[in-house]
Amino acid sequence: MTFPNPLIPGFSPDPSVVLADGVYYLVTSTFEYLPGIPVYRSTDLVTWTHIGNVATRPEQAGVDDVATGGGVWAPTIRYRDGVFYVIVTIAMSPRGCVVFTATDPAGPWSDGITIEGVDGIDPDLSWDDDGTAYVTFSGLYTSGEQMGQHLGIQQVQADLAAGKALETPRSLWSGTGLKFPEAPHLYHRGDYWYLLIAEGGTERGHSVSVARGPSPEGPFEGHPANPVLSARSTSRPIQNTGHADLVDTPAGGTALVLLGVRPLGLTQSFSPLGRETFITPVSWADGWPQPGPVRLAPRDAVDEEIFDFADPSALEDLGWLAVRTTPGSVASVVDGRLAITGHAGLDDPRPQFVGRRQRHLTATVSTTVDASRGAGGLAARYDEEHWICLEVRGTVVTARAQVAGLAQSWQATVPAADVELCMEMILPSAGLNFAAMGGDRIRLLAAGTLIAELDGRYWTAETCASFTGRVIGLYASAGTVSFAGFRYRGAEA
Ligand code: 6LW
């Protein structure tokens, strides 16, 4: 069985999957973006449809004040007795470890109950045969005096309805000693309970390790050849592989969904899209799971999304994202155009920006903007310190590049009213110096004229030290600007 890889391209880290009544549902992290926790559906583990989002109401995730990089970290989705559960940590926020429920995974989901007594990240949910609910998590404090302290893999029995742990956390097996034992998932298979974790950190040293034991509480014995999966020190095209969740395949086999990155160039140093979702088959030997190496198999179809705002429902598409608020509170469709009123620049923690994940290494994004009554345009962002934009104000277009406080800009004049803006992300062509071959090229065009061409290395997960990925979209920084449409065309090289 050859799976497409990436399975969910673009900024889609920390995947968790569940098989419920023959249908697969998968969720990923969203950090400071809303709507939070996208839900994807599949009947064959190959073709996936974005059917909803868990956190569609700001109060559910409570990310409006989280620091960049905080917010919605690593959800786990599970299904029991007709109810879907998503348990997740809202990191660097008082919201803590939260359980959301729904009977329809497309939503609506519940407001969410905080589980008191679970101080950590990457919570997993499992039930013993007698119905006892277990929350197994990584004991990393993300707020308070103990911020950064790591207690390894921990577990409590919990009363989910009451929102509380029923005991003080117990320490479980925490891997082979690599840093950051995290992303625990428990599975009852045959005679064993399996504890799958990530260790080594989510960068190049990321790994998957597994242990097994007689009960959900262990004791757990590690696989003799742990970590059972890692791309570290290999030249595999998919790196950082880890943070995995196990699932049965339609063909009766087993597979892992997990995160990884696609760094460019010989040195494999820079990943424009951030952490994506991948999949790899798992074989079994002596009652132990053995994941196969994660193979690159991008879908070769050209992927096009065209939003014409003459259709008022265009902004309701599930893939739109906004920063610490909902897309609908930033933009609205007025007279067949998308209108955004700007109060601050892209360096603000709450920019008036709505965007979509860049999902292909080569992509073209374009729009037509009327900025006769304000300033705004097209932008690609990692966070408020790392972004690129084409901003129109009246008849002047300014291309700006911002990297951690360093900024550069280029200007040109454009015809009044509707101006075509375009961003082209292309792979480096021969003739560039060795290092620059490690990044993509980002070409900024206005009214068909090239305003600037940028070295994409500076807007990658590594350079931005970011948990997220590239999000490209529309924004206003002052006054009201309006957009006729938004076009995304992506293809794997
Ligand atoms: C996630 C954890 C991690 O909770 O990063 O580095 C966090 N590993 O597993 C955010 O993705």
Image: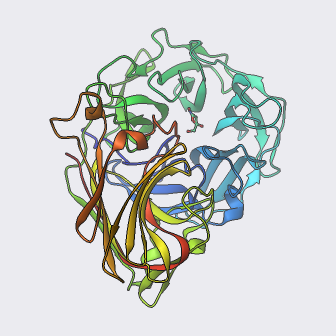
Q: Quadrant of residue 271?
A: top left
Front in this rendered view, residue 405 or 348: 405
Q: Ligand 1 is found in which quarter of the picture?
A: top right
**Residue 163, position as x, y percentages in the image:** 80, 48
- At 56% from the left and 64% from the top, the residue drawn is 104
**Residue 57, position as x, y percentages in the image:** 65, 66
Depicted 86 relative to depicted 58: above or below? above
**Residue 391, position as x, y percentages in the image:** 43, 66
Depicted 331 relative to depicted 93: above or below? below
**Residue 480, position as x, y percentages in the image:** 53, 80
Depicted 140 relative to depicted 456: above or below? above
Front in this rendered view, residue 341 or 48: 341
- At 44% from the left and 83% from the top, the residue drawn is 372
136 with respect to 339 (left or right):
right
- At 35% from the left and 76% from the top, the residue drawn is 485
108 with respect to 118 (left or right):
left
Q: Quadrant of the C terminus?
A: top left
Colour convention of the picture: rainbow
Front in this rendered view, residue 234 or 385: 385
